[in-house]
Amino acid sequence: MSINTLVAKIKEKGNPTVAGLDARAEYIPESILRRNFLLHGETLRAVAESMVAFNCGLIDALCDIVPAVKPQAAYYELLGSYGAMALKQTIDYAHAKGMYVIADIKRNDIGATASAYAEAYLGRTRVGDTEIAPYGCDCATVNGYLGTDGIEPFLKECRNRDKSIFVLVKTSNPSSGEFQNRDMEGAPLYARMAEMVAKWGAGLDAPCGYNQVGAVVGATYPEEQKVIRALLPKSYFLVPGYGAQGATAKDIANSFNSDGLGAIVNSSRGIMCAWKKTGNNGEDFREAARAEALRMRDDIVAAIR
Amino acid sequence: MSINTLVAKIKEKGNPTVAGLDARAEYIPESILRRNFLLHGETLRAVAESMVAFNCGLIDALCDIVPAVKPQAAYYELLGSYGAMALKQTIDYAHAKGMYVIADIKRNDIGATASAYAEAYLGRTRVGDTEIAPYGCDCATVNGYLGTDGIEPFLKECRNRDKSIFVLVKTSNPSSGEFQNRDMEGAPLYARMAEMVAKWGAGLDAPCGYNQVGAVVGATYPEEQKVIRALLPKSYFLVPGYGAQGATAKDIANSFNSDGLGAIVNSSRGIMCAWKKTGNNGEDFREAARAEALRMRDDIVAAIR
């Protein structure tokens, strides 16, 4: 599914947001965890199975109003091989429910190794005479510090399988400026990265008017959003930092184009942990997540109108 | 195990090299693959079990002469949950055989997420009242593009559990200069990254005279090695690019200090695929790997003397 599919889903639902599925055990309602501890003991498996149950509940509650999910690989890797299984099940379930899946992996490596990552998350790997898609996501985040030959294997999946990527340009964290905002031959590093994103995306246009190579641009940096928006008119932005990281809907308005498209705003903890604010011990985690997703949609749509 | 342990193992074996365990199916002898295809069909599991058998054979053949192994996460992720299991088994087997384990993951993310990665690969995660080390490596590679708050969770594992990290400074791939060699306020980006590595390593000194925060510096760039060596006298270098990527022993001499310490040179394909040059269909993969590891050791020791 290409960026075209993502844009179609955003338009259909009138909702330019993505739900992060990044559960630590603390974010999962006690009743789900308790059941799995009884079944599997205090093991990584128990947490992984709890995560799948929680994710499936969230996907059920969100799939008709939210276009995409973004599982963050770190929280699955924290659970070893059971976590890897939970990641695959989450991706498959989200696909079955019609959602676009963005693997937040921020991978980067030399060409040969980047090929293995690209095949793992976006493509296929040959096993004897069979071809298998290990994770089969629609899109992945990548880090461009290694330059073109580390990105090329991901571009190959964009070209051959209609996948898309988001390259880290200006990240949402407090210390992102330590490198990204320093001057590199007359422009900040993040702007130099944006120039490369434009180059990598050239020729990968989709019918929606955007190309398959987008940028990660933190909601927490409105000024940088404006600069990057101007440098990358045809790139979609993945915008983290709304909610738990402190950015408001007003802060992300600069990431959008005047047609109301061009960006998708992520919320992870805001949606996953919405149940913690209702005082019902998590029994209502689905309803709480849905209510927060609707609130966030309306908040953002109002700000970009 | 801290950088001190790595240095002790390097001295004990008189061998400043590390064996990369990055097997694609093509690198594994046919007889191992065939057996697992019969047992498990043409599945990711069959390749993952083949990889474990191959890795264990390599570790058996190398553990008395090579101080460390470096599994590259990408090739395990390519095999889904079975790959994650293969990674853990490889790490455990290498530890059982007394080797230092460097997880080549090049991870990077905002603080909260970087914590999950650091706990997954170097630390522990809490499950109910139990603490579990998901992978339990000694060391990991990281990417510093996000600045200090993305590195801090890894430094915490260095401080609290005596772990070590290698930060990408100048990578070995052909296009690494696209960003890393451009001028950032009067010095190349790789030098700015090296300055931060020095800052991150301050106060993390080990008795061996080096600190826990090292640098990845490509064997393919001898001039940059010299500059970075001067900027980071107390950091160990992880040096990829020898052999299959084209660098020779002479090219890596600048990564070492005058005491013959300060760097560990990686070879992955050179050692893993040594059996392809003997004409014996891989039956002798252990002997071929050992012979190549000894040749590489002597080649490098002669060049840095």
Image (tube, coloured by chain):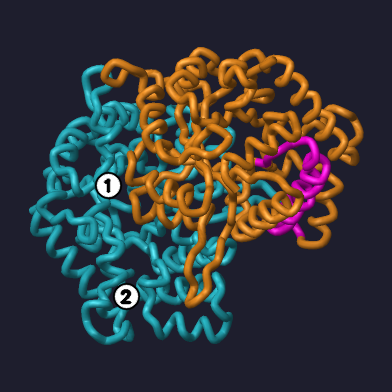
Chain colours: A cyan, B orange
Where residue B37 sits, quadrant-wise, is bottom right
Which of these two is toward me, A63 or A12?
A63
For residue B240, side relative to residue A166 (left or right): right
Label count reads: 2
Inspect the image, locate mark 1, and give the three-letter code of the amino acid beneath it.
Asn
Residue at left 38%, top 54%? B113
Question: What span is colored magenta in the figure?
Answer: B41-69
What's the mark number on residue A61?
2
Q: Residue at x 30, y 32 (%)?
A: A179
**Label 2 marks which chain's residue?**
A
Which residue is at the front of the view, B6 or B188?
B6
Identity of the residue drawn at 26% across and 19% down: B185
Mark 1, other Cα within 10 Å: few <14 / some 14–19 / many ≥20: many
Q: Is residue A285 above or below residue A292?
A: below
Decide if residue A31 is on the left or right side of residue A16.
right
**Crowd rating for badge 2 (residues with CA inside 10 Å; few <14, some 14–19, many 20+):** some
B188 inside magenta stretch: no
Sequence-first disc among 2 and 1: 2
Q: Which residue is mark 1?
A: A173
Inspect this view and state whether residue B38 appears.
yes
Q: Is residue A163 visible?
A: no
